[in-house]
Image (cartoon, rainbow, N blue to C red):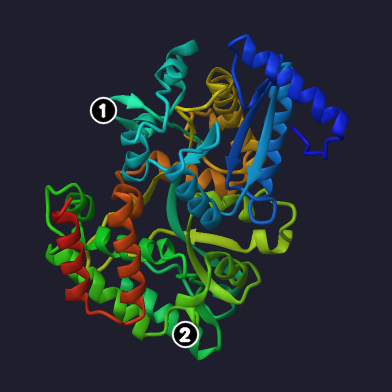
Amino acid sequence: MKIKKAFSIIAFVWLSSMLLVACSDGEDEGNASGDSKTVKFMHLWPEGSSAQHYKVVNQIIEDFEAENEGIEIEVEVLSNEQYKEKIKVQSTSNELPDVGMTWAAGYMEPFVDGGMFASLEDILEEDNLAGNFVTGTTEAFSIDDTAYGLPLELNISSIYYNKAIFDEYGLKEPTTLEEFNQVVDTLKENGINPVALGNRDAWTGSMWYMYLANRLGGEEDVLTNAIDRSGSFEDPALLQAAEELQALVNNDSFVSGFNGLADQEAKSMFMESQAAMYLIATWDLPNYTTNEDVPQEFRDSVGYFPFPQVDGNGDFNSYVGGPGVGLFVSENSEVKDEAKAFVSYFVKEWGERAVTEVGIIPATKIDGEALDLPDLYVEVLNDLNNASNITLYADVQMSASAAQVHLDMIQALFGGEITPEEFVKTHEETLAKE
């Protein structure tokens, strides 16, 4: 890994002269100097919040550099929200990193339409790499049958809960919304925060709305249909989902001040046993299984249950989730061949390491029975294997502009600033214009 150092004047002069020679020979400019080339890699797994991810990423980079003399990986690490803001700014000035992370579907469309992401079809064809991925995951990162990203994760969301708190008050995993409300009422009566929610980030609240829509829609994926325009956002199930969400808010199901809290703050409340439940995706599994920085006592106390049925509707095997982040290569990279070599190496190495060392579910196929995995992980893996449907996160399905409207409306709905009718009407009008 490249370590930034202050160059001396002599070193600077030497470097400048080498760069001039390289340019005069018609070779790559910018990140390439002489025989050494630097690939700029920006990711969103900081050491503080994603310790296991951060550690394994660095190990893969070190291994890659050791096996590929003359290629250095210069790393920049940002938090999720910082990453989204910076990549947006970089795209406007056409200065994307050589390799970065992207979300699938609607999120990446503007980058592909703008010619900013390189095709990765050649990587998939190498060594039959395409066959290593779980079916459907690479398709989510493809537009017009061309892959512009390679997925790293496969996530489903569930409600994680503190078993010690549930046991203390004689609570059971709820299977219906009525039972869920009874759990909430008991927790409140005993001074326990029911649900940790950091809705300043809004995608967290979106998962609650999406699950209510998923359950009320029954066998029909009404939310996806509304987004892809084969249906309408004024579907009765989507309106009732908004009504049910405000009912949860009015019942004080969520921690106080949820619209001003970041997800990281809500996560901390759950992990410090200040709240009993937390809806999150499998990217957080390391905190409940393998992350040794988290006390073993807490990890042993974490269980999970599928989102409850609503009005007798809903399939427990139908999930909100989908591929998480993937890797892209900048079309304008001056070291594109080296960047693609790094991406190819990374996805091959990430698969099993993601399972055994990070504790998340990768987008590449794994032989779970051959690995020694925590029980909680095996249970989630079995759920995934039995999934009847996975509804891709709404803000990922939508275009960037529609996703922003969705997230703004989610915050307003949680805050009681709009009615359920206004919520669905705004969504329908926004999607109809695209």
Task: Give coordinates of residue 311: x percent, y percent.
Answer: 22, 70
User: Visible in this render: residue 202?
Assistant: yes
Q: Is residue 267 left or right of residue 388?
A: right
Residue type at mark 1 is Asp
Where does label 1 land, which residue?
A: 144
Task: Give coordinates of residue 150: x percent, y percent.
Answer: 45, 30
Indicate which disc, 2 or 1, sits on the residue closer to the N terminus.
1
What residue is shown at x 36% (from left), y 45% (from top)?
Answer: 107
Vertical order, 297 against 378 (above or below): below
Dividing the picture into quarters, in which one does residue 164 lie?
bottom right
Task: Give coordinates of residue 233: x percent, y percent.
Answer: 16, 60
Dot 2 surroundings within 10 Å: few (below 14), some, or many (20 or more)? some
Task: Report the quarter where the N terminus lies.
Answer: top right
Residue most extreme to the top = 25
Q: Is residue 37 left or right of residue 346?
A: right
Q: Is residue 127 left or right of residue 10?
A: left
What residue is shown at x 54% (from left), y 60% (from top)?
Answer: 303
Residue type at mark 2 is Thr
What residue is shown at x 29% (from left), y 44% (from top)?
Answer: 388
Which dot, 2 or 1, sits closer to the camera? 1
Where does label 2 land, which residue?
A: 186
Between 357 and 408, the residue placed more toward the observer is 408
Which SS class for mark 2? helix
